[in-house]
Amino acid sequence: MTTVKYLKPQQMELCRNENYYLDNRPYLDCMTFRSYNDNSQIQPALIKGEIDWGSNFIADIESTFVKQNPENHHFWYPANDAIHLYVNTKEAPFDDIRVRQALSMALDREMIVDIAAYGYPTVNYNAGGIAELYKANIDQGVTDKYRNLTTYSPEEAKKLLDEAGLKDVDGDGYRDMPNGDKFTFDIEVVNGWTDWIQVVQMATEFFDEVGVKANVKTVDWAVYDKNLKDSNYKMSINWSMVSTNPILAYQAYFSSAYVGKIWHAGHGVNSPEIDALINSFGKTGDKVKQQEIISQLQEFTAQNLPFIPLFSNATWFQYNTKKIVGWPSEENPYIQPVFYDGGKRVIILNNLHLK
């Protein structure tokens, strides 16, 4: 579908290209794409049948969507990217590894997933930078070695913060910097991303329990995008690179060439040595050696903790079979249903047809 029939600020219609490279595809003549401002607008549109394909978080989807029309309303949430709280390690006190470790240990990940995300994501206890999507590549030895960093341990978190010199000097219940300044920071999240706003809100509450004052800061996408690339943040919730091999995720995290260009590399943990390790991956076709490199990168990530792992996100995918069928599903998982991935989206479009 490459023929644009019309284009409006929040809607466009794409129709069949008669010269498409696949004969008799796509089956559908046209498809309308609609843009919504936030998650709360998508849910009623799905329920009313105004849209057939959704790709956003929907709270309590079994009750709010599926139950309304069990025959035609469906969802499938396979594993997707790892979600982290990215930390700017170039700024005090986040330049102290003990502070980053303490903030990680202050979080009850299971409660965050169950309450803020309705249990749909999978808790990520691996401090090595990857999660369920790359399950086959996770070095269990690294996970076990650093499991204390992702285990809810508020008392241990307090001890580390004390060791780092962050103590409540004035008795207001919150920790101060060694120089006497208040230790307070914002966690950035995009306005309208209701599930992540709830996640960040819960994170601030857990930080509060160990005497750390953190605030939810909702920003427009343009601000969020620029701040991550420019390292203009203290902490920000963001995802990891999704690909067929986790080496691309580690390139995005640590390659010096990506600093200032993408969201994941602005945390400040980079070095020529780690660049060389990442580059060595493509110089060997030996699968064993490649996995050894991935394991070393997991160890490096856990040692430096440039971001605090939270959970493995679900691939948000809701669909309506009242008029259209051919959707991927748990029973027919021919492709991961990632809407924002153009290649995967095209494969799905090529399989959709009228009921």
Image (spheres, grey):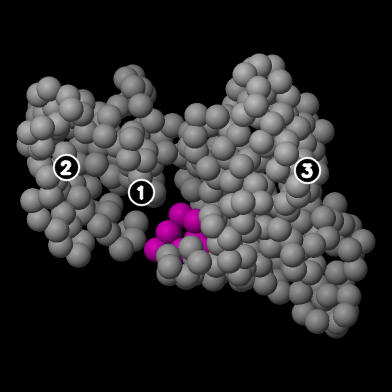
Instruction: Give me the C-alpha separation between circle 1 and circle 3.
Output: 39 Å
In percent of the image, x 12 and y 49: which residue is there? 4
Please state which of the two labelled residues, at mark 3 or mark 2, is closer to the viewer. Answer: 3
Mark 1 burial class by Cα count in 10 Å: few <14, some 14-19, many 20+:
many
**Residue 273 tag number:** 3
Q: Tell which of 317 and 234 is nearer to you.
A: 234
Mark 3 burial class by Cα count in 10 Å: few <14, some 14-19, many 20+:
few
- Going from the N terminus, do you reach mark 3 or mark 2 first? 2
Q: Position of residue 38 (x, y in %)?
A: 34, 61
Q: Position of residue 105 (x, y in %)?
A: 76, 50
Which residue in the structure is indicated by mark 2? 2
Secondary element at image label 2: loop
In percent of the image, x 82 and y 33: which residue is there? 145
The reply to whether the magenta stretch includes residue 352 is: no
| The image quarter in which residue 40 lies | bottom left
Which residue in the structure is indicated by mark 1? 56
Query: Quadrant location of the N terminus?
Result: top left
Q: Is 333 drawn above or below residue 110 in the view shown?
A: above
Instruction: Give me the C-alpha separation between circle 2 and circle 1.
Output: 24 Å
In percent of the image, x 26 and y 34: which residue is there? 346
Q: Position of residue 132 (x, y in %)?
A: 57, 31
Magenta residues span 189-199
Q: Is 36 drawn above or below residue 309 in the view shown?
A: below
